Image (cartoon, rainbow, N blue to C red):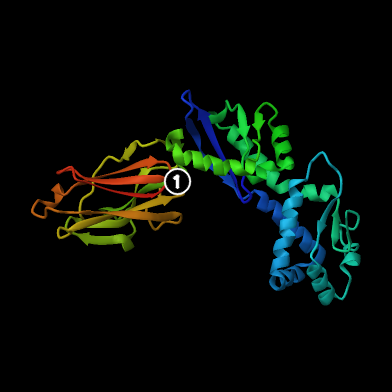
Amino acid sequence: MLPRGTIDITIHELMPGGQLKELYKATGGAWGGTEVDEAYKQFIISLIGNPIFQRFCKEHKDDHIHMFRDFEIKKRSVNPENDSDVIIRLPFSLKETYQKICDQDLCNSIKQTRYAKEVSLVGDKLRIHASVIKGFFAKSIENTISHVKDLMKNDLVQTISGILMVGGYSESKMLQNAIKDNFPNVKVIVPYEASLVVLKGAVIFGHTPTAIAQRVCRYTYGFNTSVPFDPRIHDRNKLIYTDDGLKCTDIFQKHVEIGQAIIQGQPQILGGSYWPTFNYQTDISFEIYCSDKKSPMYITDEGCIKLGQITVLVLDMSVPIYQREFVLSMSFSGTEIEVSAKEKRTGRCTKTTVNFLG
């Protein structure tokens, strides 16, 4: 998927029944159309200077927005096979701001820059040589191609037969040609109105959530718990005193890890059980976390995010604490995770849902 801001790449296998099986976790980066916009912004700054550009943005917000909207339209028409100059309208307020601060005409000043031979300004029309415009795409395309090539080296994706490009940036001929040139043995498909395909796919997925039979986790998911304190490995700041002895709190108890394949609707149950920390507890709250690390130790580690929590009641306080046992499970379905806490002695089950981030 190639929306304007990021490049998001997923790898799927089409199964006999028409369902999709994800083979590798979704990856990508901030190399989309906004990186091309950033290159254009830096180009403008090289012509007028950053202080003037910042003042223009501050004092003429509407013109700043319109300037980049004009560029958005123009960049869609940039074609690697076309060497014609591209003409972009510059706001009068930008020229006026430059004139006021520098006491020079911007048209003449451009002739003193390194773009003197490729760029000219007549009135409010900025004429840019095709090579300069194409250069705005270079970093975005280079990062995208490099990332796809790295993915192709993975044993799981050696037999890729097609690349499907969707999202607004997919409509760029510059990107399309780069993909086709670098992967000549793979069929490249760009559907009509690629910018709308993501929306249409979301609608279809909403009606048919079972269309994706298997997902691969982008994050590690688990619960906050406590374990017997071990001074050799645990942080003393997390030491607590419980009815069951010394415990280390804030432990990230992993249930599903990054890169693990999960089948739609199939509960992921971790071996082991959970008990109340203190004998007087009438309820237990299990906090649900995800992390961008494969095996975080604590929920306070960098990259850990709290998604929600599930609270279960301890109804029978007369039984020993070791009989107040609960088993937790996660079931991944569509865009949500169903979290269940089942009391082992009675079979009583409590459920909640949190967002599935991927």
User: Image check: 166 left or right of 119?
Assistant: left
Residue 7, position in %: x, y? Answer: 61, 45
Q: In which quarter of the image is residue 71?
A: bottom right
According to the image, label 1 marks what residue?
A: 219
Name the residue at 84% across, 73% down.
99
Total numbered labels placed on residues in the image: 1
User: Image check: 352 left or right of 50?
Assistant: left
Residue 40, relative to residue 193: is it above or below? below
Residue 171, position in %: x, y? Answer: 69, 42
- Of residues 154 and 10, the one nearer the viewer is 10
Residue 283, relative to residue 216: is it above or below? below
User: Image check: 345 left or right of 28?
Assistant: left
Residue 220, relative to residue 190: is it above or below? below
User: Image check: 246 left or right of 91?
Assistant: left
Q: In which quarter of the image is the N terminus?
A: top right
Mark 1 Cα-neighbour bin, 10 Å: few <14, some 14–19, many ≥20? many
Is residue 1 among what the camera can see? no
Task: Give, as a three-letter code, the residue at label 1.
Answer: Tyr
Residue at the top extreme? 16
Circle 1: element type = loop
Is residue 29 among what the camera can see? yes
- Of residues 79 and 276, the one nearer the viewer is 79
Name the residue at 91% across, 62% down.
111
Residue 247, position in %: x, y? Answer: 25, 56
Name the residue at 78% across, 45% down.
78
Residue 9, position in %: x, y? Answer: 57, 40
Q: In which quarter of the image is residue 330?
A: top left
- Of residues 24 and 207, the one nearer the viewer is 207
